[in-house]
Amino acid sequence: MWKIKTKDIHPELRAVGNLIRIIMPRFTRGFFKTADFFLHKFGLPDFTKGLCSEEIYITREDGSKLRLRVCSPEEKREGVPGVLWIHGGGYGLGCPEQDFHFIQKFVDASGCVVVAPDYTKSVRAPFPAAFDDCYKALIWLKENGYKYGMGDDKIFVGGNSAGGGLCVAVVLKARDTGDVNIAFQMPLYPMIDDRMITASSQNNDAPIWNSKSNELGWKLYLGESYGTDRVSKYAAPARETDYRELPPALTYVGTVEPFTDETVEYVEKLRKAGVEVQFRLFEGCFHGFDLIKWTKPAKEAEKFLTDGFMYAVENYRAEQKR
């Protein structure tokens, strides 16, 4: 049982957590659809400062267009990382612009180019729509990153929550196919296990994202495959059994959220396979705690991410196949 009491939550997060529990105790199908409609129709403003921010549209196999938000420094540098950053939202809502705080940090710190796809949400189409969009964005980055000064041995992939799950899925396919050699992965508190068999994922009523929200998110994303053995490892990466030859990783997670155990297990499996991992557990922190920027845990998470990212910039390379 993971019933989360107020005393279990970090003191600086308790007031916000209790308010969130009152306003929105869990996500609903209607909320996903409504949020997707408004974000799809109106979007969010560009909050970046001092960056070149472009909207680029690439064509899917069915002829429809996938929107990419591409951010880079005003003064281009050479040999910088190219980062595919994938936003969260339970696979059912969200847009690239909600993660400008992450994007801004990466670009300011390293001069990198960041590609953030506005992937198909589950309320519009289930797996593999979102996954295919993100993988297409990765290929676009590999083929076009040089225009922004990207070194082709510095392709990184990251994301948070469902975006972290898509990050791991994209990294798996890239390894399996050899299409792209990825140098570094950053799946923050990733949503990777549809089976909800870990202790932290069951009966968890923590703020923002809990067991009920998680179950609905997976049902929408997997569609008719939900609850079956037909679920692809590219949909739910925790189903993978071979973690060898994956790129070095950085991740963190709070101790009172549904994804605590599956994140810890992912880290353990990577390390067992000989993959270098930077990892931190944040005591008493619920899902998305790092977005509550004025708190000490969020500030510590930001520093951990930025420092780890810059370590990767300086130390990790993965040459592309010719």
Image (cartoon, helix red, strand yellow):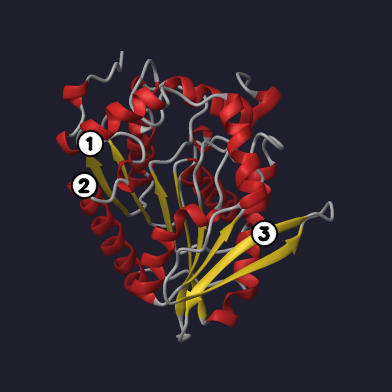
Asked whether, in this view, residue 145 is left or right of residue 259, the answer is right
Asked whether, in this view, residue 36 is left or right of residue 313, the answer is right
> At label 1, which amino acid type do we have?
Leu
Q: Report the mark closest to the observer, 3 or 1.
A: 1
| On screen, residue 110 above or below 184 | below
**Alpha-carbon distance for marks 3 and 1?**
35 Å
Query: Is residue 291 shown to the viewer in this render?
Result: yes
Does dot 2 land on a helix, a strand or a loop?
loop
**Alpha-carbon distance for marks 2 and 3?**
33 Å
Q: Earlier in the sequence, mark 2 or mark 1?
A: 1
Question: Which residue does the image show at 64% across and 36% down from the upper left?
Answer: 122
> At label 2, which amino acid type do we have?
Thr
Quarter holding the C terminus is bottom right
| On screen, residue 204 above or below 159 | above
Contact (Cβ within 8 Å) of mark 3 with mark 1 = no
Residue at the top extreme of this rendering: 1
